[in-house]
Image (tube, coloured by chain):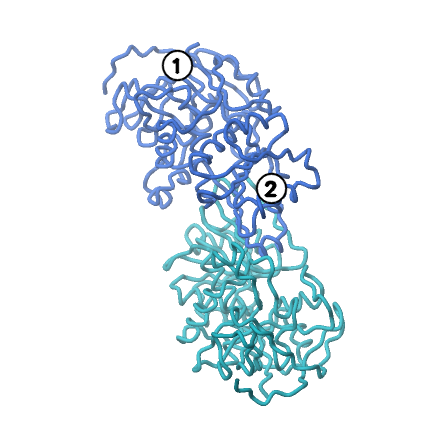
Chain colours: A cyan, B blue
Amino acid sequence: MPELNIPKTQRALICDEVGSPLKVREIPVPEPGPDELLVKIHFSGVCHSDMHIWLGEVPIKFPSPPAVGGHEGSGVVVKVGENVTNFKVGDRAGVKWINGTCLNCDKCKLGFEESCATTLYTGGTRNGTFQEYALIKASEAPHIPDNVDMAKVAPVLCAGLTVYRALKDTNVRAGQIVAITGAGGGLGSMAIQYAKAIGMRVLALDIGPEKEKHCKKLGAEFFVDPTVEANVVEKVLTLTKGGPHGVVHIATSEKPLEDAFKYVRTRGTIVIVSLPKDATLVTDIFSLVLRVITIKGSYVGSRADMDEAIDFFARGLIDIPIEIYALEDIPKVYDRLHKGDIRGRAVIDLSK
Amino acid sequence: MSTTEEIPKMQKAAVFDEVGGPINIKEIPVPECGPDDILVKIKYSGVCHTDLHVWLGDFPVETKGPLVGGHEGAGVVVKAGANVTNFKVGDYAGIKWINSTCLACEQCKRGFETTCSKAVNSGLGVNGTFQQYCIGKATEAASLPKDIDLAKAAPILCAGVTVYKALRESNVYSGQIVAITGAGGGLGSLAIQYAKAMGLRVLAIDMAEKEEHCKKLGAEFFVDPIKAGDNLVKIIQDLTNGGPHAVINIATSDKPIAQACEYVRTKGTVVLVSLPKDGKVNADVFWMVFRALTVKGSYVGSRQDADEAIDFLKRGLIDFPYEILPLESLPSVYDRMRKGTISGRVVLDLWK
């Protein structure tokens, strides 16, 4: 089996324990198991959930810190385990949130392997993509086409996948209107583009004139700023002549979700994607039943969804701005994420 | 316009003048039949918990007396308006919750006339079926088969169609397990029967006294949440090998909904049917997203749904206990309903 020149140690951003300062250190390059790939990471996107995990805000914990976060890695396969048949050295591969599943339970058998009970999580329960070399089960890794931009494809692996699947989950059809809360961020920007690619009309909700310009440039037909609009619900109802048929909730606060219950069209679907700390959903049963509203939690996507999401990107239909950073800059990126300052996605360059 | 039977000028009806005030059995005029209406001689009317909610003013809707409640009226057409083409005198017909719709708005055009923006409700917007003669728009009235048992058909007009539709909305398929909270009551009993007729396996959830009743109707499993206490989730997940694929919430309180979100299978659906006063859905967003759960409201059923629900009854697949009582017993029926002591349905005989 051909092997490229793989070093013994590599640079990685280490998390010693929940909330501890993040520093770049040298750690060993891992060995792939018989069913795994070792991927040299060229670029890794930074997802808001990486920050949530680092801060201990979600019930996903590293089993044995120190650990490495990150789960949007695009790269090249440099080593394959002996049982691997679907990848060879030199192939481009993605390392995404779902790192491996059992492939035998009812969820896996039904094509929902992201809900498998025995899942490995990249940058969650095993080391992730904020390092130069990462592992993933070959059965779980997506192929990345040769002709695509590796920096730009990285955010597709989680942000793109998640919003693509969320949009499908809304059951909104081409020609109908989908509202997207937090439309100006990483996921939001992707959501506007995927929605347009599917033929949906987009109403973007976010804060400030900069985000308005950004959202409209990406294809949003309508924009509503809840901090400026006296009555958000009225405005959305008027703009959409009765309410959007679906809502994808990406914003990380509860008020946009409360508003969504009021403005979503009768029989519409609200898909929840964001995971703010301790968030609860409280809504009126009477209204939910009489207006026949559906609420769905949407969580990443399956391997089939992943292939489809990459395909839209490869066909040039998805193009969001990215900001390139070095591995050491991740704490600064987290700060900007927290303030909602990043338009588009932050991507770490590990290719040098 | 044609009639064969002599229609009286006055009739017996159960009337309340104010919300929560006394319900009086009195003589009131037989209503006039408009050109689009049918006048139905109500033989039997089921009593629905919604009627109780309306009388008590539990719903956030304006309720003005004097009002005749009731919306599960099965009887015979004694008069048909000049424009009516789908009913003739002598036909069996049912007056249900949706008394009339516009048939021209977006919801109606999609076959969702229950969410018509101009829907009028029997026993709320117009006098309902706790009277001997009731009008309804012919296009909305349910057509009942000629030889059907009208006392048994009455509860299908709301309870039956509602649970039938809720089961379909849950997306559970034959062989899978559906949990029903409040399984021993009117809707619950019908839900068990429809679920069996649809090839589903049933987990009935109610107070211990209802176990024999539920199992007799076909429930495979039974759990009393009070007895189960803190072990409820574990008991249910063990019984069903990972959780029921869906939960139909018929119990009239909020707590079962939060519990349902915990024990339902990953990727499962919780369907909300009951309308507890000021009820709220209170769900943890993280688990809703991570387990990709769906929570949706389901509200009665369309005319097509009603036809299908009635067809199951006609084919002998729906059997449930019901008591026939005179109209005068309505206040005591409401009392038993509030205490949760009715197993099955109470049907009022308007002519006893």
Which mark identifies residue B29? 1
Drawn side of residue A289 relative to residue A49, left or right: left
Can residue A225 be seen at all in this image of the molecule?
A: no
> Residue A9's spot in the image, x, y percent?
68, 85
> In which quarter of the view is residue B304 placed?
top left
> In which quarter of the view is residue A210 placed?
bottom right
> Residue A352's spot in the image, x, y percent?
59, 88
The kind of residue on which mark 1 rests is Pro
> Residue B236's spot in the image, x, y percent?
61, 42
- Output the chain of dot 2: B
Foreground residue, A297 or A268?
A297
Q: Earlier in the sequence, mark 1 or mark 2?
A: 1
Vertical relation: A47 (above or below) B323: below
- Output the chain of dot 1: B
Give the class, few, some or many, for how many residues have Cα within 10 Å of label 1's Cα (few <14, many ≥20).
few
Is the Cβ of the residue at disc 1 closer than 8 Å to that at disc 2? Answer: no
Helix, strand or loop status at disc 2:
helix
The residue sitting at 51% across, 77% down in the picture is A93
Which marked residue is nearer to the observer: mark 1 or mark 2?
2
Which mark identifies residue B287? none
Marks 1/2: CA–CA distance: 56 Å
Vertical relation: A123 (above or below) B275: below
> Residue B57's spot in the image, x, y percent?
56, 28
- The residue under label 2 is B239
Helix, strand or loop status at disc 1:
strand
The residue sitting at 56% across, 34% down in the picture is B204
> In which quarter of the view is residue B84 placed?
top left
The kind of residue on which mark 2 rests is Leu
